[in-house]
Structure formats: structure tokens, C-alpha cells
């Protein structure tokens, strides 16, 4: 791993820890147990997908740590799924898939993983798959749009070299 990738990964991981600490439980979040949505909580891992699978997994773990520091363990367990969908998305991006398509293919995976992870915590199938799964996919779309805009700015300022639709 390059030093630059490690440094950017560390910064994104720090942001992924800070987002739940600063925004969870504020008007920038929604809570319908077992689902919760904290605005921009997926942005660090989504941006990390443009760096490498290792960095994306690392940032996803950082997200879980941040949520574990502030919220119930079911939400931290859901956040740990960021490491999986981030790693898959980063691998697809590394293989040449356009960034927008990476967001599209990771959305159902993200929703399914978060739905499955709440089941051992005693939530019903409808709470898991309808509330959490569908809610996560909607949240994924919102954060993907934010990530897409940030990614475009990073390209514009030459902080990333790969073309967005290339």
C-alpha cells in the first residue's frame, strides 16, 4: 500500500468515526429501530472505494467503531457491514467498473447485509428486511449522491486521477 493511500485512508477512517459522534441523535439522523440513518455516514467508505479494497475495509471498520462509541450494538453491527460492501465496491472499482455503477451494485448488498445482521438481535423479518433493508438502500442512495459530488470535486482538483465514468 502506498503511503498516500494509507494517509487518505486514515483521514477517511477518522471522519467515519466522527460522523456518528457528531450527528447521531441530531436532526441530521433518523431512528426507526432497528433502522437508523445518520446523514453522510457512508460517504467516507464510499470515497475509500476509489482508493483500494484494503482502505475501504479499514474505513468501514472505523465506521463501526464510531457507532459503537455512541449507539446500541445493533447499530454498530450494522455499521460493520460497511467494511464488506466497501471492500466489494472497491474491488469492482479497481477492476474498472465506473464509480456510479459501484454504488448501484453495492446498494442491494448493503441493504441485505444490514437486514441480516439485525436478525440475531431479536428483530422480526419485517423489521429486518422492510424497515432496515429498504431503509438502508434509500440511505445508501442519498449518501452515494453526496459521495458522487465529492468525488467529482476531488477529480476537478486533481486529488484523484481516475475519470468518473471511465
Image (spheres, rainbow, N blue to C red):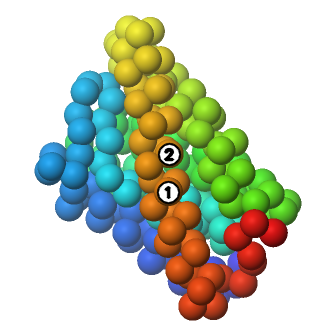
Instruction: Please identify the quarter of the rendering in which residue 52 is found.
Output: bottom right
- What number is the disc on residue 56? none
On the image, numbered disc 1 is attached to which residue?
145
Callout 1 secondary element: helix
Q: Position of residue 161 (x, y in %)?
A: 72, 84
Q: Could you tell me if the residues under marks 2 and 1 are in contact, i.e. CB atoms within 8 Å?
A: yes
Callout 2 secondary element: helix
Q: Position of residue 32 (x, y in %)?
A: 25, 27
Give above or below for 54 relative to 27: below
Give above or below for 7 relative to 59: below
- Quadrant of the snapshot with the C terminus: bottom right
Q: Mark 1, residues whose alpha carbon is within 10 Å: few (<14), some, or many (≥20)?
A: some
- The residue depicted at 45 percent of the width and 37 percent of the height is 138
Give above or below for 25 relative to 58: above
- The residue depicted at 41 percent of the width and 10 percent of the height is 126
Residue 19 in sight: yes
Along the viewing direction, whichever of 162 and 45 lies nearer the viewer: 162
Q: Position of residue 158 (x, y in %)?
A: 63, 90
- The residue depicted at 41 percent of the width and 26 percent of the height is 132
On the image, numbered disc 2 is attached to which residue?
141
Residue 6 in sight: no
- Quadrant of the snapshot with the N terminus: bottom right
What separation in Å lies between label 2 and label 1 (alpha carbons)? 6 Å
Q: Position of residue 121 (x, y in %)?
A: 36, 19
Q: Mark 2, residues whose alpha carbon is within 10 Å: few (<14), some, or many (≥20)?
A: some
- The residue depicted at 32 percent of the width and 42 percent of the height is 37
Amino acid at each position: 500500500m502506498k503511503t498516500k493511500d494509507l494517509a487518505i485512508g486514515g483521514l477517511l477512517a477518522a471522519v467515519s468515526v466522527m460522523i456518528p459522534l457528531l450527528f447521531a441523535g441530531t436532526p441530521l439522523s433518523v431512528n426507526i429501530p432497528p433502522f437508523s440513518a445518520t446523514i453522510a455516514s457512508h460517504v467516507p467508505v464510499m470515497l475509500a472505494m476509489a482508493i483500494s479494497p484494503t482502505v475501504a475495509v479499514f474505513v468501514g471498520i472505523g465506521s463501526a467503531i464510531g457507532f459503537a462509541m455512541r449507539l446500541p450494538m445493533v447499530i454498530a453491527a450494522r455499521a460493520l457491514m460497511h467494511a464488506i460492501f466497501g471492500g466489494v465496491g472497491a474491488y469492482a472499482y479497481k477492476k474498472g467498473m465506473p464509480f456510479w455503477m459501484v454504488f448501484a451494485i453495492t446498494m442491494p448488498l448493503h441493504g441485505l447485509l444490514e437486514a441480516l445482521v439485525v436478525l440475531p438481535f431479536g428483530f422480526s423479518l419485517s423489521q429486518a428486511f422492510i424497515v432496515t433493508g429498504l431503509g438502508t438502500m434509500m440511505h445508501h442512495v442519498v449518501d452515494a449522491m453526496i459521495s458522487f459530488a465529492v468525488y467529482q470535486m476531488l477529480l476537478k482538483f486533481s486529488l484523484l486521477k481516475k475519470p468518473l465514468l471511465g
